[in-house]
Image: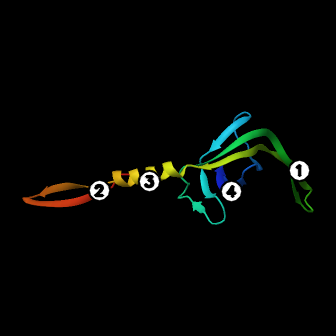
Amino acid sequence: MYAIVEIAGKQYKVANDDTIEVDALTGKKGTVTFDTVLLYAQDAKTVEVGNPYVSGASVKAEIVEHKKGDKVEVFKMKPKKRYQRKQGHRRHLTVLSIKDISRKAAQATKKKAAAKKSTTKSTKKKTTTKKNKTTSKTTKAKKK
């Protein structure tokens, strides 16, 4: 079982008991739940793709630690001009341990069925008057 989840604006492929490093998240050590699941796969035959997210799917993870990544050095130089600049930085990262990937299929299908029943089209009549001429227009409004 695996899922593709969106964390801090980036997409990660995760499975149970995986350990991933993501951009720094706020929060202390503990459990975090991500509901922004883009794809959920039980096995190779049953794959569900969200539009944009899979409803009822969630990924539970535990924050293991906050740390800094490897040092990246930026060196700028213009030859024959005596111009050299050296700069470096280290990204702040959060280490996550994936604990559970779950999907609540029964509730999701009930919600979809209820949403389809509740959306009805209503018509409104709009009338305008111009110098002794009356016209009427019928418009359809959608509920979101």
Q: Secondary structure at mark 4?
A: loop
Q: Hey, which quadrant is residue 14 in on the image? A: bottom right
Give the spatial CA distance, label 1 vs label 2: 64 Å
Q: Which amino acid type is shown beneath numbered disc 3?
A: Lys
Relative to 24, 34 lies left or right = left
Q: Which amino acid type is shown beneath numbered disc 4?
A: Met
Q: Earlier in the sequence, mark 1 or mark 4?
A: 4
Residue under numbered circle 2? 121
| Residue 2 in view | yes
Which residue corresponds to the image point at 25% horizontal and 59% vertical from the top-left? 139
The numbered dot on residue 1 is: 4
Which residue corresponds to the image point at 78% horizontal and 39% vertical from the top-left? 64
The numbered dot on residue 112 is: 3
Give the spatial CA distance, label 3 vs label 4: 24 Å
Give the spatial CA distance, label 3 vs label 1: 57 Å
Measured as percent of width and height from the top left, residue 142 is found at 33, 55
Q: Earlier in the sequence, mark 3 or mark 1?
A: 1
